[in-house]
Image: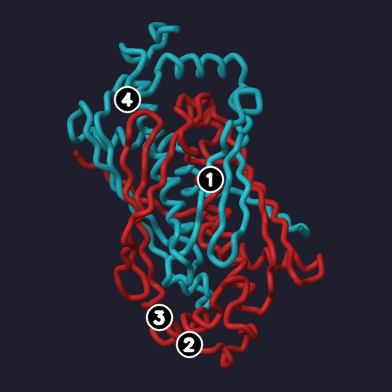
Chain colours: A cyan, B red
Amino acid sequence: MATATNAPTAAPATTLNGVPVDQLVATVAAIQAIPSLAKFNFRINNAWSGGSQNRSTAAGFYGAGQQQSRTQPFILEADEPAVLLGKDTAANPVEHLLHALASCLTTSMVYHAAARGIRIERVESTFEGDIDLRGFLELDKSVRQGYQGIRVTFKIKADVPEDRLSEILRLGSAHSPVFDSLLNGVPISLTAKSL
Amino acid sequence: MATATNAPTAAPATTLNGVPVDQLVATVAAIQAIPSLAKFNFRINNAWSGGSQNRSTAAGFYGAGQQQSRTQPFILEADEPAVLLGKDTAANPVEHLLHALASCLTTSMVYHAAARGIRIERVESTFEGDIDLRGFLELDKSVRQGYQGIRVTFKIKADVPEDRLSEILRLGSAHSPVFDSLLNGVPISLTAKSL
């Protein structure tokens, strides 16, 4: 296994925060040499199960120059709670959105801290967002359908002074693909076909 | 159970597409009478498990004028595939984002079709998006961290002529909270504290 001794910001250990820093450094070097290795295409398939219920499968993706497939696809369920006319068998779509944001901010923060030799011991976070259903129900055109705002609180245990914790969190928000996507928006194209 | 006979757009049946249209009509009437019932606050807690792994819990939310709690919280896992230095035990954050979008567009479309008396038999969809890892790795400042674009294809079996399928899909995109959030962006506030 390669060591990270030739990386300017690498940690002394080859693994920090559970992140294989040597592989991270090797990935950066590979992409610097061949930028097309950085191109990823993620995809899911979804099937409606009736009413408020549907299910996505995440089987494979394209990245690092090739198709990447999993032996077993991941199944992601969605439903709505009773008050939103569902059966409450799974988290609902806007909760899944908060999970996507939470998981991406956390992983981005931990990876970039590891690359800088910052040891993180524990991370917990809360995410909450406001939605006014009058947007979804088209009862008030001035009310948006989506989240009006999302508030994020991270609690971090790390070997830095407390006043530097916001810098560590910024390692997440400055690099997270989901944070950027949700904060700044993404172009989305829609096509409908007959089944 | 109330019937939907007094609703201008209600279907003949009280349930259509698996959606209890009578309850949907009653919800609209309740919110028209008391607009504050439309205010929802969704939330999750996330805990880092080390490296690429973390887990969210969706236990309860505020909506319809009161705290709503589940007897058992839903657990949402996240990991990264090996090529992104993870253990590949769960879908990754950007796949969860596609699931949030897929589930919300599907549910929004099905609910609004039911409210208009449009019967939908089957729905399947694919979602794919492009990410250039040079954004995450800060190797090129001109490359964004997030999705550069997302392409959505819905296949729908419904009792309408094929050239009206895009109108049915538009019932989803015009009302979906996640679609609006992701297309147009959401203000996000971040706070870091010591654990």
Q: Which mark is residue A75?
A: 1
Q: Are marks 1 and 4 on the same chain?
A: yes
Camera-near label (4 vs 3) is 4
Work out whether residue B64 or residue A5 is closer to the camera in this orientation and state it. Answer: B64
**What amino acid is labelled 3 in the image?**
Pro
**What amino acid is labelled 4 in the image?**
Asn
**Going from the N terminus, do you reach mark 1 or mark 4 first?**
4
Q: CA distance from mark 1 to mark 4?
A: 28 Å
Camera-near label (3 vs 2) is 2
- Mark 3 lies on residue: B35
Q: Which mark is residue A29?
A: none
Give residue A190's quadrant in the image: bottom right
- Confirm whether residue B179 shows in the render: no
* Mark 4, secondary structure of its residue: loop
Say which quadrant the N terminus of chain A sits in: top left
Q: Chain of mark 4?
A: A
A189 is higher (above) or lower (below) than A120: below
Provide residue B85's location: percent of width, then percent of height: 46, 24
- Mark 4 lies on residue: A17
Q: Are marks 2 and 4 on the same chain?
A: no
Q: Residues within 10 Å of mark 2 (few under 14, many from 20)?
A: few
Q: CA distance from mark 3 to mark 2?
A: 23 Å
**What amino acid is labelled 2 in the image?**
Met
- Mark 2 lies on residue: B1
Is label 2 in contact with label 1 (beta carbons under 8 Å)? no
Q: Chain of mark 2?
A: B
Q: CA distance from mark 2 to mark 4?
A: 55 Å
Q: Chain of mark 1?
A: A
